[in-house]
Image (cartoon, rainbow, N blue to C red):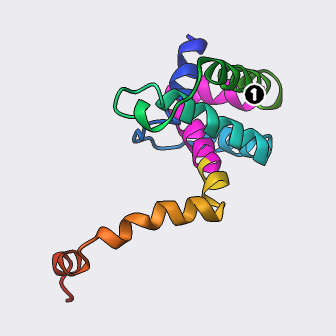
Amino acid sequence: MKRKVLLLGLLSLTVSLPALAGPDAVALTSCLSDNTSGKDRKDLAKWVFAAMSTHPEIREFAQVSDKVREQTSNTTGVLVTRLMSESCAKQANAAIRNEGQVAMQAAFRALGGLAMQELMSNPDVTVAFSAFEKYMDRRKIEAAFPAK
């Protein structure tokens, strides 16, 4: 049961699921945040990227070797083991016991958000993310939101 809840929590890094975070989820989120470094978060983002690169519609954009994918899985496994069995064991147990998989999903989604912030703070990434703006039809968008 706990393995399934943990896996669902990790998978929530890649999807947006509605969840109301209770006090135990908040405590677990804080613990995960406090016990991961910038490097840990970048490693987590690499794992998400490597996993997403296996999707048929994404595969052509990212050539991630099986070796790299295995390395990122290993690094993430070691990180999650440390967080769940040492650093945040008390908070994880309380969250699972009192709030179930929703708490785990909320906590790991928040950690995934921190991982994305680590990447987004790079100026090159910021430029790449804003590149779509030159293709937007601003008049159409403004027309969709008339002033009161």
The residue segment tinted magenta is 89-115
Quadrant in the picture for the N terminus: top right
- Across and down, in percent, residue 19 comes to 44, 41
Say whether residue 56 is magenta.
Answer: no
Q: Is residue 61 left or right of residue 77?
A: left
Q: Which corner quadrant of the image does residue 145 belong to?
A: bottom left
Q: Nearer the viewer, residue 3 or 119?
A: 119
Q: Is residue 42 left or right of residue 20?
A: right
Residue plotted at (73% across, 25% down): 75
Kind of residue indicated by mark 1: Leu
- Across and down, in percent, residue 123 comes to 63, 65
Residue plotted at (46% across, 66% down): 130
In the current view of this chain or complex, which residue is farthest to the right?
86
Q: Nearer the viewer, residue 68 or 103?
A: 68
Q: Is residue 71 left or right of residue 129?
A: right
In the current view of this chain or complex, which residue is farthest to the bottom?
148
From where the camera sits, is residue 57 visible?
yes
Residue plotted at (36% across, 26% down): 56
Q: Nearer the viewer, residue 9 or 78?
A: 78
Q: Nearer the viewer, residue 52 or 35?
A: 52
- The secondary element bearing badge 1 is classed as helix
What residue is shown with label 1? 79
When the figure is inspected, residue 136 is found, relative to residue 118, above or below; the finding is: below
Residue plotted at (48% across, 31% down): 53
The residue carrying pointer 1 sits among few (fewer than 14), some (14 to 19) or many (20 or more) residues within 10 Å by Cα, namely: some
Which SS does the magenta portion mostly show? helix
- Across and down, in percent, residue 111 comes to 63, 42
Q: Is residue 16 left or right of residue 50?
A: left
Quadrant in the picture for the C terminus: bottom left
